[in-house]
Image (tube, helix red, strand yellow):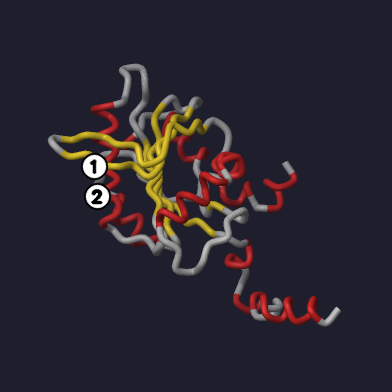
Amino acid sequence: MGLQIESGLADRQGKAPNNFPTTLPSPESDLAQQTLKHPYIFDFLTLQPKAAEKELQRGLLDHVQQFLLELGVGFALIGRDVAVRVGDRDFFLDLLFYHVRLRCFVVIELKVIPFEPEFTGKLNFYLSAVDSKCRHPQDGPTIGLLLCKGKDRLVAESALRDLNKPISIAEWQTRLVESLPDDLKSGLPSVQDLEREFSNQ
């Protein structure tokens, strides 16, 4: 509980742009919105600034316990790079989860760059594939979560407006420092300053 308070969970819960009110029935739309966050804090990762999506995926699964804690209650990991066949081609989902409270699959698409509108089209396609290939009659509609390294909220909301599959877009951060205002960031010592300080002791 202490870690959730420190990470500002209450301020992040239900804040991600989404199209749930138009793509999910009530009260599922409200529950789905409150289940997801913005931003997600992955302080347990040590990624280089130019890290690839595979490195992000590997880092999350190397720390799967912390990752599941950050996702929140109810997420059960099905797999990574899960193949879904459409026509004669296999398409690979970055991460596939099942949410036991929402009773639906959740596809997470990882991006190491800021949000682009075309990301929603690809995820919308993945959700259709999972709905047709994996979803059981008693399951709710598959939900998509795009985790990006930054986004413009207006662009994200516009990209979601006319999609017919439930998608949410959230940022991820690797250090709480990234969320500090610039004037506070400038007052923090650099890694080089800290190394010099410790080497002089």
Dot 2: few (<14), some (14–19), or many (≥20) neighbours within 10 Å? some
Residue 155, label in figure: none
Q: Quadrant of residue 89?
A: top left
- Give residue 143's position: percent from left, percent from top: 37, 37
Dot 1: few (<14), some (14–19), or many (≥20) neighbours within 10 Å? some
> What amino acid type should be assigned to the residue bearing mark 2?
Gly
Q: Is residue 10 above or below residue 152?
A: above
| Observer able to see residue 68 | yes
Which residue position is annotated with label 1? 125
Give me the residue at 66% from left, 53% from top. Answer: 7
Q: Is residue 55 left or right of residue 115?
A: right
Give me the residue at 63% from left, 62% from top. Answer: 176
Q: CA distance from mark 2 to mark 1?
A: 6 Å
- Give residue 48's position: percent from left, percent from top: 51, 66
Q: Is residue 162 above or below residue 193?
A: above
Mark 2–mark 1 CB contact (< 8 Å):
yes
Which quadrant, please, contains the N terminus? top right
| Observer able to see residue 20 | no
Q: Is residue 134 above or below residue 168?
A: above
Residue 121, label in figure: 2
- Give residue 44's position: percent from left, percent from top: 62, 53
- Give residue 22's position: percent from left, percent from top: 32, 39
Q: Quadrant of residue 163?
A: top left
**Farthest top residue in view:** 138
Q: Quadrant of residue 19?
A: top left
Callout 2: SS: helix
